[in-house]
Each structure stands twice: as structure tokens, then as C-alpha cells.
Image: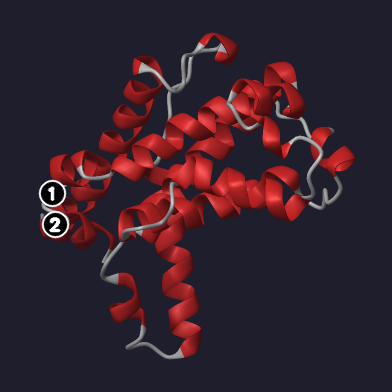
Amino acid sequence: MVARHVAVLGGAAAATSTGVAGTRGVSRLGALLSGIATEGVEQTLNTLGLVRLVGQDRFLVLDELISFIGGNGDDLDAQAARDAGCDILDDLFGDADSWQELAGVGVTEAELHNLLERFLALYIYNRMPVVAERLSRLDPASQRQADHQMRDIIENLVGITVPSDVGSIDWEGAQGRAIAESAMKSAYDAISALDAGDRT
């Protein structure tokens, strides 16, 4: 089922080229996370032009950051990125609620790498047009099992190569886009290969 998703999108190359929100989301999430890792939350918001969020509560901060990462959700691609961003931001900020708690959140380089990979895996999963229809044919227990299996397969196939000095990366420029596009293409190529392996 996972490999068929790529064929529905026109193959790995087409899936990558049309994944605009995912590419932008990886770049912007990278900018957010690397900023937090090197400068902290407050300075990062200032740098990213989100100074209006400084001092605000969790609801407003996360809502604005979801839009920063995934856009306005005006199509299925953007909605897939927004949903993925929402999950990642929940992981990042945990139980932090007040501005003081939000501002105290930090990110290590290992966490940055893991969060970027998880975002891309969630985005690819959310973008799968055949999932809901196929899962609806199963009983609830089988639905949960199949859902977990698909998520695990995608997460295992997603890999993002990030230079060791994350603070030096221009995440919203050409370098960040190249990292995002390369990771997405590699993931879709790997998912497509599953189908080829099933036919051999």
C-alpha cells in the first residue's frame, strides 16, 4: 500500500517535485530548530520575523508556528505539512504552556536531526491519498496495526543528511532547499523500490 502511494502521485520524481509544502516545511522547520539550538527561542522568533509571538502563550505561539512551517493549509499538500508540523511542535514544546516555559525549550543537534526526519515522514504519510480508503475496509484492530506498520515503514526509509554545524546552514535559502529536496527524493525513491521488490 505504501509503494502504491508513490505511483498515484506519478512516481518518485513527480511526488518530489509536487511536494512543495513538504520541501518548504523542512526548510522552515530547520530554520526554527537550528535557531533554537544556537540562539534560543526568543532570539529565533526575532530572527525569523515572528517577534509578535514573544511573550505570548502556547496556543498562539504554536498556531503561528504551524502556519510558518506548513502555510495556510489551502490545499491537501499544505494541510499534510501543517498536520506534520503540529505533531512536531507538540513534541518539541512538550508540556510547556506559559511564555517562560516555551522560551526555556532547547534543542540538541541530535534532536534537530530526529525532528526533521520525523516531520518528513509524517508529511509523506499525511500525503498518502489511498490510506483512508484502504484502511476503512479493515476492522478496527487491523486498521491500527496497518496504520502503525505504514508509519514505521516510512520512518525507516526517511533520512536527512545535515552538516555537523547546523547553525551555519541557510535553511531558508538554496542550501536548506537542497537538503529538503534531496531527503524527499531519497525517501520517495526508497518507497518506490518497495513496489519493485514486491514484484521480483
At which x and y percent is residue 183? Answer: 35, 32
Residue depicted at x 76% and y 30%: 106
Question: Which amino acid, mark 1?
Answer: Gly
Quarter assignment of residue 164: top right
- Quadrant containing the N terminus in the rendered view: bottom left
- Which residue is at a point 11% across and 52% down the rendered structure image? 10
Q: Is residue 176 visible?
A: yes
| Mark number displayed over residue 7 | 2
Q: CA distance from mark 2 to mark 1?
A: 5 Å
Relative image position of residue 52 (x, y in whole percent): 69, 36
Residue 9: quarter of image: bottom left
Q: Are marks 2 and 1 in contact (CB under 8 Å)?
A: yes
Amino acid under label 2? Answer: Ala
Quarter of the picture holding the C terminus: bottom left
Pick the front one: 44 or 141: 44
Residue at image position (43%, 50%) is 81
Q: Report which residue position mark 1 lands on.
A: 11
**In the rendered image, which quarter is residue 158 located in?**
top left
- Disc 2 on helix, strand or loop? helix
What colour scheme does the image use? Answer: secondary structure
Q: Position of residue 123 (x, y in %)?
A: 41, 51
The answer to whether residue 118 is seen in the rendering is no
SS for dot 1: loop
Depth check, front residue: 82 or 192: 82
Q: Residue shown at 40%/58% (left/top)?
A: 79
Q: Is residue 194 left or right of residue 149?
A: left
Above or below, 155 relative to 183: below
Q: Position of residue 74 (x, y in %)?
A: 35, 58
